[in-house]
Image (cartoon, grey):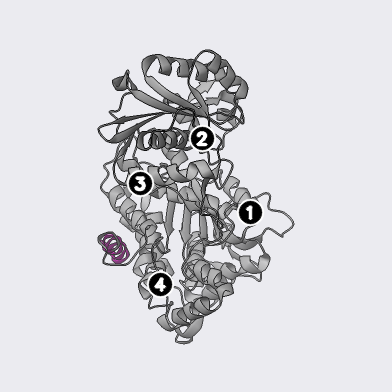
Amino acid sequence: MSRHVDAALAYARAVVCGEIPACKYTRQACERQLSDLERPISESWPWIFDEDRADRPCAFVELLPHIKGKWAREGRLIELEPWQCFVITTVFGWVHHRTGLRRFREGYVEVPRKNAKSTLSSGLALYMLAADGEHGAEVYSAATTRDQARIVFDDARSMAERTPELRTYLGVAIMQHSLTVAHMASKFTPLAAEGSTLDGLNVHFAVIDELHAHKTRAVYDVIDTARGAREQSLLWNITTAGTDRSGICYERRTHVVKVLDGVIDDPSLFGVIYTVDEADDPHAETSWAKANPNWGKSVLREDMEAASRKAESMPSALNNFLTKRLNVWVNGDSAWMDMRAWDRCADNTLQLSDFEGERCWIGLDLAQKRDFAAACLVFERDNRWHVFTRLYLNELAVQESGNAHLSGWARQGYVQVTDGDITDFDVVADDLRSACARFDVQEIDFDPALSMYFAGKLIEEGLPLVEITQRALFFTPPLIQVENLVHEGKLRHEGNPVMTWMVSNLVVKVSKFNELRAPTKERPENKIDGPIAMLMALGRALALTEQPEEPGILLL
């Protein structure tokens, strides 16, 4: 085993067993790698870990010099830290067992400042330009401004300038605004959104530096779509945390988190996030070490202590300390559910037919066009709540959805697709009638905003519909109660992957004035209709079973 692969695996094992302080996302990334290494080749898993391919970029980067700080003054070459070996060997080591093409097409590394992000990226850019074996390679350092884009590029150029023998051996020519390898027809240039055009690219490797600073998704989308002609192109996102949760960076981060949580399967994406856990004290040294993988190397205790004191004494400096030093996203709402706890509550043996004749509460969240219509049936048995979710969406919304998994979920029957461009409420109504015939339905709780006509027809038929206005006053108790039920193992659900995805999308907005909580989502495409229906059903069921209401009184 190569030295770099050995260091990477030792690091991953140390993180997983707790010898190295790490947040849950770092631990999950390490667990994912160790778990993947145990998987046998199959039709669904065609990947092998090639130690030679994993080692090559590490060995290359360590031929390059430091170009800033005391180590540059001393003329020292780069020595990769174990966490850097883990990142590089994981991304470059996995290849298809027949074609030899790389598994990962996108990397996302979120790490605080002063952890040598740019140095690592510059070294990899040089490797992809001159040593990856790609003819006509186009390598870019991309950012919102040309100055930012030049940071990685200028560092790479300085590395090349200070290694003349290596530069000559590889055939790298240095120009003011580019590095080229003539015999390979390859080039490396900075790329900025403020430039005249971003068209006509054929990307082999692109570093998007400080992705959180991108106000639009233009640069990301152009580079992402410019990789189709390459067999193993790599998009390398590297960033600190930020504040804009509606931007492209948080979108990619969210996707990474879902992959690490096991909500979404995306074998082409590598992601690792270095930060603190939610309950950690941001001013404790243990938190600093957890968030900064270069702790004690390029991240020094004295510097962190000074920054921490400033953040404690100056509220205006706190957000900057959290985002840049600890990689904490600020000015946003918090995720509702611990997805591992939710996954532990999954029971694939649950059958709705096993609950014939039992008391049932139904939550109903209706939508016609882009959102899902959702009906959630809940039953209490043996001091546990059992949850069944039915989801409906029209075929046009499925076709136009940006969620690549949705069509597959629909084919597997996790979503009922109705014809046309508007979800057919008659299908939902038929299912509700069937439920009332099969179970002892106490209530069908609905929001009148989109469904008064629909509800009126069913009320005329004798179905027990109850109006529930979707507001924080109603949602605050069930948001807390359902989370507790999940953690206590007192909730069971079917393991519907669409519902799991929706639960992972739900965030909680807490009022600064009265502590009331409201469920919401960070982006329009992050659907939460299923959990909303569940909260409506369980909110009413829990309230009514714990505190029986007086006749004629509606608890909202």
The residue under label 2 is 529
First of labels 1, 4 by sequence position: 1
Q: Are marks 4 and 2 in contact (CB under 8 Å)?
A: no
First of labels 3, 2 by sequence position: 3
The percent position of residue 259, horizontal first and vertical second, equals 41, 47
Residue nearest the observer in this picture, 384 or 52: 384
Camera-near label (4 vs 2) is 2
First of labels 2, 1 by sequence position: 1
Q: Callout 3: 10 Å neighbours few (<14), some, many (20+)?
A: some
**Amino acid under label 3?**
Asn
Distance CA(mark 1)–CA(mark 3): 42 Å
Helix, strand or loop under label 3: helix
Q: Where 31 sits versus 381, above or below?
A: below
* Residue 503, visible in the rendered structure: yes
Distance CA(mark 3)–CA(mark 2): 20 Å
Q: Which residues are magenta?
A: 1-14
* Residue 420, visible in the rendered structure: no
